[in-house]
Image: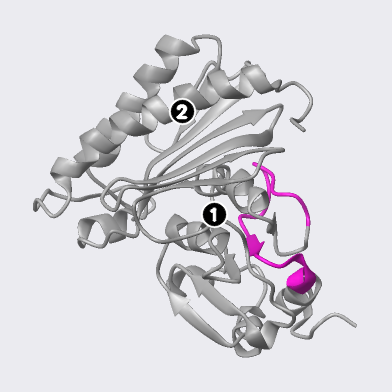
Amino acid sequence: MTPPGLTPADADRLLEAATAAADAAACVIRPFFRAGISVDDKSDSSPVTVADRTAERTIRAILAERLPDHAVLGEEFGLERGDARRCWVIDPIDGTRAFVTGRPTFGTLIALLDDGVPVLGLIDQPITGERWIGVRGRPTRYESGLPGTVGTRRCAALNLAELSCTSPEMIADAPTPHWDALRRAARRVTWGGDCYAYGLLALGQVDLVAECTMKIWDWAALVPVVEGAGGRMTDWHGRPLRADGDGTVLAVGDPAILADAVSLLNTGRPAG
């Protein structure tokens, strides 16, 4: 089933626009990869490059041509047509630190919000050629020449879970002091990955991702991908993710471990 306000034909039309935008952005990004381009620091000290800015302009141009009545919110250039019900949310290079150091674990994120709810999400890795496509109410699709089958895996308990997080520095700004309790409860933790880790969760390679300081363009595209593969995404309190939320994001492949993960993040103890 498709969610209210998004018919099957509508979903196909919107997905066509999103994939065209991702294809064009990939063509922009590839020539800059490992090309020794300069890196600027934004006001929040996060890095940005000509690849980020050019890719976002390209995505915006395609969406504006095909869907001129839709709003667009991007990390680099802000909000346009903000009164529209449907809003595209763009992160042209999620994982710029990975990109500028030559690691192919970044991705282009394109999401569509319908009345604030993520109904379409796309993760595109332009170097490896991997693409995850999520449409709310449909199974996630994985398009790639690399091995991988969509579907989160069963994980009966947190002590069996592979936990991923982008960086320890991110956790230093966490709103609660209990992330380390989750780390100790998990089987092991792997650092790095940005949006790529959520794609791996959708393939059953990772069981759990817990991060903070996330903006809407960091997570909006991930929700349909993860949930369409059988997982769940919430904030650290187990609540639906919101643009005005606290920036925490929790993704689980097996919903059975969600309650314990939420409890550990908030109290330092598992549920029950």
Location of the C terminus by quadrant is bottom right
Does residue 172 appear in the picture of this structure? Answer: no
Question: In the rendered structure, which segment of residues is drawn in magenta?
Answer: 239-258
Q: Main secondary structure of the magenta part?
A: loop
Q: Amino acid at mark 1?
A: Met
Judge left or right: residue 160 versus residue 47: right
Residue 271 on image: x %, y %: 85, 80
Q: What residue is pinned by disc 1? A: 214
Q: Is residue 252 magenta?
A: yes
> In the image as oriented, which residue stretches furthest toward the right?
272
Q: Amino acid at mark 2?
A: Ala
Q: CA distance from mark 2 to mark 1?
A: 22 Å
Q: Which residue sits at x=65%, y=63%?
A: 250
Residue 254 on image: x %, y %: 71, 67
> In the image as oriented, which residue stretches furthest toward the left?
36
The correct choice, above or below, for 237 with respect to 36 in the image is below
Q: Which residue sits at x=26%, y=50%?
A: 127
Q: What residue is pinned by disc 2? A: 18
In this rendered view, identify the residue nearer to me: 214 or 102: 102
Q: Which residue sits at x=49%, y=63%?
A: 200
